[in-house]
Image (cartoon, grey):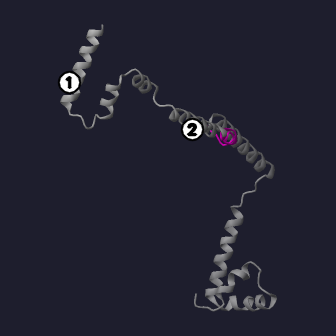
Amino acid sequence: MNCAHSRRISRYADNELPQKEKEFLDKHIFTCPPCLHELKAITSIKERILKNKVDTNAGFFWQTLKKRIDTEARAVSTKEMFSLDFGSWAKRLIPVPIFASLLVLAFLTINSRNSNLIDAYLFTNQDSSVLELMDNAGSQSEINILLYNQTSFLRSQSIC
């Protein structure tokens, strides 16, 4: 638009201008073709909007809205029934891992005090030469260990 007053045409069409400006634009629009064209375009748009306006029954709207809300609520409640949501159980389940941790800690403490029961049985049923051989296993050569094993085997055979 080339006219400086064209910005106020929309407000004029909506009756939002003060009385003095409205009187001025009443005279100006009929003398300025661009402003008259703008006013005709705006009023044409407003008429089309009013023509296509659909009257809706408020009761119908609320009924359909209520049905949609009920349908959504049923869908959500069905989904919640089958979901594995542990949020509500979280406070009840907190003591379980704590108790399990304490149980494992107690077991490890008790078990560490006692040596391995199988090792204890084997060490108590061996003579001193076997224990000495086990203590010095790193310094013994493989030949000595094999010789010792053969002599131990022969001794066990002679005892039987």
Which residue is the extreme one toward the left?
143
In magenta, the rendered stretch is 84-94
Give the residue drawn at x 57%, y 38%. 105
Is 102 contained in the magenta span? no
Nearest to the observer: residue 104 or residue 52: 104
Q: Are marks 2 and 1 in contact (CB under 8 Å)?
A: no
Give the quadrant of residue 72: top right
- Picture quadrant of residue 16: bottom right
| Residue that badge 1 annotates | 147
**42 displayed left or right of 133:** right
The residues tagged by marks 2 and 1 sit, at their Cα atoms, a distance apart of 44 Å
Q: Main secondary structure of the magenta part?
A: loop
The three-letter code of the residue at mark 2 reads: Leu
Residue located 18% across and 29% down the image: 143
Residue, disc 2: 105
Binning the other alpha carbons within 10 Å of mark 2 as few (below 14), some (14 to 19) or many (20 upward) gives few
Relative to 143, residue 157 above or below: above
**Is residue 58 toward the left or the right of residue 158 in the image?**
right
| Element under disc 1 | helix
Residue 60: percent from left, percent from top: 77, 48
